[in-house]
Amino acid sequence: MKEITYREAINEALAEEMTRDENVILMGEDIGLYGGNFQVTKDLILKFGDNRVMDTPVSEAVTAGCAVGAAMSGLRPVIEATFSDFVTLMMDNLVNQAAKIHYLSAGEINVPMVLRLPVGCGTGAGAQHSQSLEAWMCHVPGLKVVFPSNPYEAKGLLKAAIRDDNPVIFCEHKLLYPTAGSVPEEDYTIPLSQANIVKKGTSLTMIAYGYSVQKCLVAAMQLKPKGIDIEVIDLRTLHPLDEDTILESVKKTGRVIIVHEAVKTGGVGAEISALIAEKAFSYLKAPILRIAGMDIPIPFNKTMEQACVPQILDIKKAAERMMRR
Amino acid sequence: MKEITYREAINEALAEEMTRDENVILMGEDIGLYGGNFQVTKDLILKFGDNRVMDTPVSEAVTAGCAVGAAMSGLRPVIEATFSDFVTLMMDNLVNQAAKIHYLSAGEINVPMVLRLPVGCGTGAGAQHSQSLEAWMCHVPGLKVVFPSNPYEAKGLLKAAIRDDNPVIFCEHKLLYPTAGSVPEEDYTIPLSQANIVKKGTSLTMIAYGYSVQKCLVAAMQLKPKGIDIEVIDLRTLHPLDEDTILESVKKTGRVIIVHEAVKTGGVGAEISALIAEKAFSYLKAPILRIAGMDIPIPFNKTMEQACVPQILDIKKAAERMMRR
Amino acid sequence: MSLTNEKIIKMYTRMVTARLLEEMLNEMFNEGMLHGTTHLGIGQEASGVAPCMTLMEGDKITLTHRNHVGCVGIGMDVKKILAEMFGKETGVCGGYGGSMHMVDYEKGNMFASGVVGGGLGIAVGAALKMKYKGEANIVICFIGDGATNEGMFHEALNLASIWKLPIVFFVENNGYAVSMPTYRSMNLQNIEKRAESYGMRSIIVDGNNAIDIYNMTFSAVQSVREGFGPMFIESKTYRICGHSRSDTEQLYRNQKEMDYYLAKCPIKRLEEYMLKNNIAKSEMLKEINTQVMDELKQAVLYAQNSLEPSLENIGKYVYAK
Amino acid sequence: MSLTNEKIIKMYTRMVTARLLEEMLNEMFNEGMLHGTTHLGIGQEASGVAPCMTLMEGDKITLTHRNHVGCVGIGMDVKKILAEMFGKETGVCGGYGGSMHMVDYEKGNMFASGVVGGGLGIAVGAALKMKYKGEANIVICFIGDGATNEGMFHEALNLASIWKLPIVFFVENNGYAVSMPTYRSMNLQNIEKRAESYGMRSIIVDGNNAIDIYNMTFSAVQSVREGFGPMFIESKTYRICGHSRSDTEQLYRNQKEMDYYLAKCPIKRLEEYMLKNNIAKSEMLKEINTQVMDELKQAVLYAQNSLEPSLENIGKYVYAK
Ligand SMILES: Cc1ncc(C[n+]2csc(CCOP(=O)(O)OP(=O)(O)O)c2C)c(N)n1
Ligand SMILES: Cc1ncc(C[n+]2csc(CCOP(=O)(O)OP(=O)(O)O)c2C)c(N)n1
Ligand SMILES: [Mg+2]
Ligand SMILES: [Mg+2]
């Protein structure tokens, strides 16, 4: 094992997959010499050359479209959007092309591509550079959506995503990039659509993904002395969901809090809540809570920016309130 | 009162609002002489001229963007996408511009525009021309989303949408266009964010919108003789939701089935279910069910196309099952 | 690969196949035999077929909502095309796709996208793979005049140009995007002009003259194949039929214009050329027409007798395993 | 509205204000006094200010992520700009927007979009309203070289052209889109060429020469105002500072190139012009610099002393009432 950052973990996953399979290529804005907007692809152009690490013009739509066509032809393109907010410019190619071509060709054609999206707020970048839009993608059959919560997860999940034969949206939280964690020396992957119980517990189930997992873990640790024993599930893959792990945990604890940074209304938490309300209803001891982003654009002002997404204190309070019921 | 079709009701709403307010203009592909892809804007160009009914090139992105700019400047543009599937090409202008400008200008600038979207399957138009993508828009603070279920609703809601000072996504189900209903002779509007109980009932609450409301009503009528007395709620506005009407009904009946044609995972039904599971949990007598579109692209084959969205029989079966519990 | 008589006859046969197929589809729609909608390419047979005749094994094309002519042009099986129109399991998309999404990867048709401009990125990506792998193949990306007003057009041509990809953008300018005449949708005499924005070479061809299209596309394809970077071809043609099934009134154009183009029918013109240059006698042409008609009738029977896809498989192809 | 001495002095003052403001911002970021990120326009003061000087009451501009120079150019209050940088209630966006979204409708700045190309549609829509209402106003849409590779650029220019809208697309070609040099992002000598794709008139200006920019933009604006349809201006300039706060290494360019452009500093050049043509004496220029600096220091104090927006209002402006 070694300690590396989330950013490095992603960089390593890319490098190792590119070494393993010459069909893996990278495309995106400033991913070459510049190293990527968040320095995730640093030095890869030196290792693999500019025919495998390709700077694109500011043309998100065709970058996505080109990835679709290359993937249909047998390559395994991994593309980067500079901010997940610009997925708005790629939607047609993702939703109407990438997600549907396997189906429309009755299984003949695969579209093995990965779109890497830096997600989330906390950097003061304002309303157009801070959104968490992953819920849209989870509403699109044919797409897979992955969101790792730490370096180990990031590396293993990205490798699995690259090897997957479907279009995968790979979300990365910007605030996680500099955070470090242990990662094995040897090659490993983490299967998609398999959630992870990061902390066992009996009092209530917290379901989260990405950066929120870290916050839930801290909250859980801080609540332990108070006799609240929280089970924390890291979803890892948001679509298609690992229903079994979720439902089993809920059946055990009977209490659920779902946590994410994305806007509450219509977020991934809604789907998870609905899933539970349909399939584990009789096990529930309390209302299902969602602690999620406020229904507002992300404000620039720092205090407001922090206030509009769940912080550890919000999560703790919600858990305590729920246990008091 | 008079009998007109959903298509005519929308046409009348447009004509009346254009007569009332010269700031109302229309833009879209083939909306002029051609009368619109679904003939909704028929003859409006003859009445109002081509400076108010403007054919656009096949350029969805700038059509949306142009509407944003015109709306910021004081016009009230109503634009049409030929199929809601092409909203994929407008997402940036809707989400990153239209929805955020009022907020980013601290309330100084309004964006009073309407985007009309023909939604849904049943016409054999295939996977890229049959989707129901309204859930995406409900995940965007700053946008409003409306989906009328009959001619009366269509006319009153569209007029309200045009008079609203926010960007409104106005969904129209293609299969409703030729269906007729009673509409008052005189001017009227239906307030946004106000749901409508179309049928009172005590056994269970069905929550639906658009074409699905019609299906629920038939199901409810057919189940009445069996002693199942269904309350049918037409959401009308999907975002922001009328929480009160939903919660009150659920508190009364204790049973909920949510019906929509959009893909189940991450659909509007998830949000409604989550809302109820959080705020009316203790009133529930049964799991919250969602009867929704299958998690697949819409297939061309007619039998499959019908099978992949809820039909009256599916709704009835679900209600009967729920009542047997 | 010059234009041998044999090839001309093959091209002619495919153009006739496309025409008769589409006339048949039109009738079947009118009789309510088919579900959904369709966009016919009647009048555009030279534009759709001739470029395909210049291709070799491993080359690819991408098509649009108006794709039947191209499907026939690239040599797809009419039985499977018709079966797809009927939504049958034996169709090219197994019944999942329908008229707008005909695909046959092996035959070279990567995908037909019903989103205007939807094929542009795909075509660029396919060309990228060919260049990356050092293959001698090329892509022809078919689009309409209307599609050249989409943002994707701009981005795709620019990317293809700066990356020097082996791709030909073949624009079938048929005068209209639904009801919008090309001259109203852009402030330009020739769409070809747009290639200059990308530093891309371009030519204009008479889109109703199969021989010319073949020859000019052939040399364009050759130069692209040799690595000189992408090319742009504007093929000036005309849509004889309505835009789609629902385009009945056609108030946006007049009979005079239609008559003018009816007289320029690409099939008639190719027949005249073949007769004049002794490539075929009129009996042979008749024979071809008869044979094609027989084949199509067989194909309709095949389609009708094919099975519906099994409902059980409705979700089978959402994800690759 | 010819270029009077008074106007030149005003233009100079604004250019100096922009420069000193941005140098100050840069320092404050380095000292950790400011949250978020920013994109400075140091070196582009002529390009950003001169076009604004040609405008009259009711005209509008749209800006980009790199908008401070334009904000000063259009006459926005530096106090409110700085307050916005500090996220304060008194900021132009009430603290909701930040560096990338400066807006002041009354002053003429409709919106600054941080999405590259995000202002294009908005500008076109504003111009549509002016034409529809028969107003004598026009819009200047500022964008960068990188933005001309976005699909929106293509669609917006085409629409403006076929609708003959009163709009000037002013491209500040500063040589780079982040690390991507313009010559690598397109196969073109001059971006100006792209205007031809839309049948749009175009000119190239020396983006570091304020007088030239003013004069040429002024005549373009006049002709647009008179109803002759949109125009396109490519202003060749250079970004002296890094792309954004995080662009530190700048491996993508070399010192020689930077030195070349440093020597072409638009402010120095305007000073030389003013001195040579007796528009101002060097004492006056010094005086202006001192005054501007004072004003900016005051503005910083104002910003620092302003209140944070109230947390209660965090959701107040999501919807208009
Ligand atoms: C993105 C998108 N916008 C609108 C449509 C509706 N539509 C279908 S075909 C068409 C016209 C396309 O014109 P052109 O590219 O010239 O092709 P043609 O139909 O003439 O073959 C339009 C607007 C669509 N399918 N996709
Ligand atoms: C749609 C979109 N893509 C990518 C980015 C990230 N980004 C910010 S500025 C920039 C470069 C823009 O270049 P240009 O238009 O030349 O403007 P400049 O920065 O040179 O002023 C990029 C790629 C963005 N903000 N928006
Ligand atoms: Mg056309
Ligand atoms: Mg630039």
Image (cartoon, coloured by chain):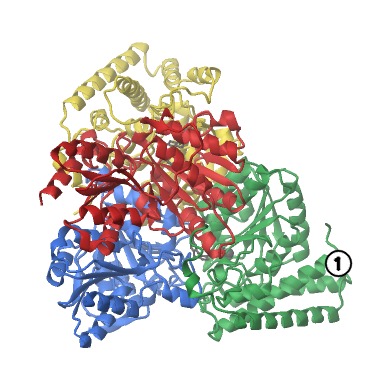
Chain colours: A blue, B red, C yellow, D green
- Assess mark 1: CB under 8 A from ligand 2? no
Indicate the position of residue D231 as horizontal and vertical percent values.
68, 49
Indicate the position of residue B89 as horizontal and vertical percent values.
44, 49
Q: Amino acid at mark 1?
A: Asn
Indicate the position of residue A249 as horizontal and vertical percent values.
15, 70
Quadrant housing the N terminus of chain D: bottom right
Image quadrant assignment for residue B201: top left
Which of D257 and A211 lies nearest the eye of the viewer? A211
Above or below residue A46? Residue D131 is above
Which of B17 and C206 lies nearest the eye of the viewer? B17
Q: Quick check: B41 left or right of B268? A: right
Image quadrant assignment for residue A166: bottom left
Chain under callout 1:
D
Which residue position is annotated with label 1? D5
> Which residue is found at the position 24% from the left and 34% from the top?
B302
Above or below residue A99? Residue A185 is below
> Which residue is found at the position 64% from the left and 49% from the top?
D127
Task: Give the crowd class for mark 1: few <14, some 14-19, many >=20 residues within 10 Å.
Answer: some
Q: Is residue C219 visible?
A: no
> Which residue is found at the position 22% from the left and 46% from the top?
A107
Count numbered badges in the picture.
1
Indicate the position of residue B135 as horizontal and vertical percent values.
35, 52
Above or below residue C271? Residue C158 is below
Q: Quick check: B103 left or right of B292? A: right
| SS of the residue under disc 1 | helix
Given the current orientation, which residue lies at the most extreme top position?
Answer: C283
Q: Is residue D31 visible?
A: yes
